[in-house]
Amino acid sequence: MARGFFFTFEGIDGCGKSTQLTRVAERLRESGTACVVTREPGGAPISEKIRELLISPCSSQMRPETELLLYLSARAQHVREVVKPAIDRGETVLCDRFEQATFAYQGHGRGLDIDVLRDVNAFATGGISPDITFVFDIPVTLSQERLNQIGKGKDRMESAGVQFFERVRKGYLEAAEKNPQKIKLLDGARDMDVLTGEILGVIEQYCS
Ligand SMILES: Nc1ncnc2c1ncn2[C@@H]1O[C@H](COP(=O)(O)OP(=O)(O)OP(=O)(O)O)[C@@H](O)[C@H]1O
Ligand SMILES: [Mg+2]
């Protein structure tokens, strides 16, 4: 059986990852494509436990190295328990955040060495990597406006300052610029329907 494809949705908080992932999954299912919708950190029971630790405001003493290894522990489990089996079954996997978040947040945001991140991430994933990553780019001010509008309390990661998110955004932009074949940069401030259509256009080249 042909393997399934793996698509990931990335960008700073409030950029529209979950909104687009839900819409795209709905449209793919309507057209008969079997999809697995999942997220990081999390997506498998052990990984969801690690997620709680990562986002809890009680983890304020967490050091960048600890944070990195927890994200990667969650990923190692998620890839082996959920992502790889689905790909092997021939299903399409749509994942909310994946390895580009590690490079952007722990690399550009926290200042950990990107070459080290690449190596440990490869160990965690066992070489599974997305066919295409969609990065939704929005200004940090729009991210904060959207999050304020929803009125959702900030988790530990979301409580980092504006400078941190500026660095993360720059990290995502640089990654997309360096690897435009695999990382599709989309203007997340545009109309939701237009964005959904563009994403489906890219995915349909794989899933038709
Ligand atoms: N293209 C868009 N135009 C206007 N508003 C949008 C757009 N996309 C998403 N939104 C709104 O912005 C808010 C955040 O969107 P969403 O939850 O999809 O972002 P996210 O990237 O998943 O955020 P988080 O990282 O916090 O999970 C929601 O209220 C959503 O309706
Ligand atoms: Mg979301």
Image: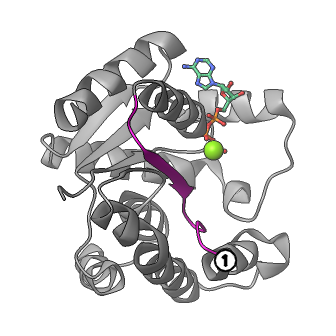
Nearer-the-camera pick, 45 or 190 = 45
Give the colouring mode of the picture: one colour
Magenta highlight range: 32-44
Query: What kind of residue is marked 1?
Result: Pro
Residue 41 in the image, given as x and y percentages of width and height: 58, 67
Residue 137 in the image, given as x and y percentages of width and height: 43, 33
State the predominant SS element of the stretch in magenta. Answer: loop
Q: As drawn, is 195 to the left or to the right of 122? A: right
User: Residue at the spot x=26%, y=64% of the render?
Assistant: 129
User: Residue at the spot x=77%, y=78% of the render?
Assistant: 60
User: Residue at the spot x=21%, y=58% of the render?
Assistant: 3
* Residue 151 magenta-highlighted: no
- Where 51 sits versus 38, above or below? below
Q: Which residue is mark 1?
A: 45
Nearer-the-camera pick, 194 or 176 = 194
Q: As drawn, is 63 to the left or to the right of 159? A: left
Give the image quarter of residue 120: bottom left
Ligand 2 under 8 Å from disc 1 Cβ = no
Give the image quarter of residue 89: bottom left
If the image is split into quadrants, where does the N terminus sit? bottom left
Ligand 2 quadrant? top right
